[in-house]
Amino acid sequence: MTTYAIGDIQGCAGALERLLKKIAFDPVKDKLWLAGDITNRGPSSLHALQRVINLGDSAITVLGNHDLHLLMVMAGYRKTAAKDTLDDILKHVDRDEYFYWLRHQPFLHHDSDLGFTMVHAGIHPHWDLRTASMLAHELEQVLRGENHREFLHALPGKSPTQWQSELEGITRLRIIASVFTRMRFCHADGSLEYDFKGPPTDAPDGLMPWYQVPGRKIGNEKILFGHWASHGESQVNNIYPLDFGCVWGGRLEAMALETGERYSIDCSSSR
């Protein structure tokens, strides 16, 4: 048995199939961890979503910002953008089943035996693993519950930027969701910076990757994350980036968690 972690697919169903073939993925004995953003921007969002759903218990997917965007569109609280490739999902006869399935995926997955934690974007520097797990569960309960539509309606926004345990209501839920699905850079006090999306080497003065904020409470945990296609390959202090921009012509990569070995396929010609 091998556990493989893969970054953002973003509708590149063909690339996913080629990568699964390259690693000879066997859903009977192997496991697949997916770092979110299954759909959108790539040419085959519907097929990518269907493929992942059909993997059943052999695949674990955490939610990303494009997944939440799709949920908001499906709920009628956000319009599709010009670059979206979601129409096949939105028009599909099974869209309600896809809506339900997405709502019931986690924001964080941790395996104590393997010693890895996977999220889409990151874990707030002021959170330890126990806190992050509790806050992910808090968010999941709302998204899976009867008030999920109210949550999706109020989710968009860039405030607050700073986590405080005293926060309540939608402002609390919004920043938790932003940390797990949108975070890249922070200021030294841990407040989120939403606008700059470049690589860490190009960060303006005063900004740093979330995992380099002084006093970060999770120092030794091995964290897998996607979301940051411009991040590059650098691996720092048990931080494992997984998004290498397949949808932009980069590559899709699988990391075998038991060995650390990586397998990749080129996305420049076919996605």
Image (tube, rainbow, N blue to C red):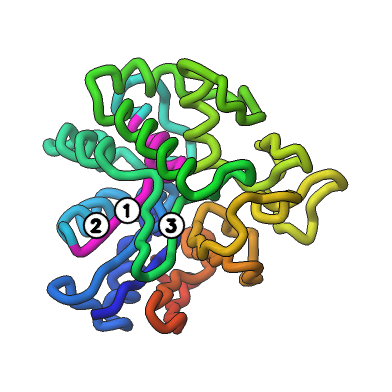
Q: Nearer the viewer, residue 233 or 18?
A: 233
Tag 3: amino acid:
Met
Marks 3/2: CA distance?
Answer: 17 Å
In the picture of the structure, the residue carrying the numbered disc 1 is: 61
Q: Nearer the viewer, residue 134 or 99?
A: 134
Residue 138 left/right relative to 227? left
Answer above or below: position of 45 versus 139: below
Give the magenta part as a residue range: 58-71
Q: Secondary structure at mark 2?
A: helix
Q: Secondary structure at mark 1?
A: strand
Q: Which mark is residue 118?
A: 3
In the picture of the structure, the residue carrying the numbered disc 2 is: 52
Residue 72 drawn at (x, y percent): 37, 27
Regarding residue 33, the answer to whether it shows in the image is: yes
Answer above or below: position of 97 versus 184: above
Q: Mark 1 or 2, which is nearer the eye?
A: 1
Q: Nearer the viewer, residue 220 or 37?
A: 220
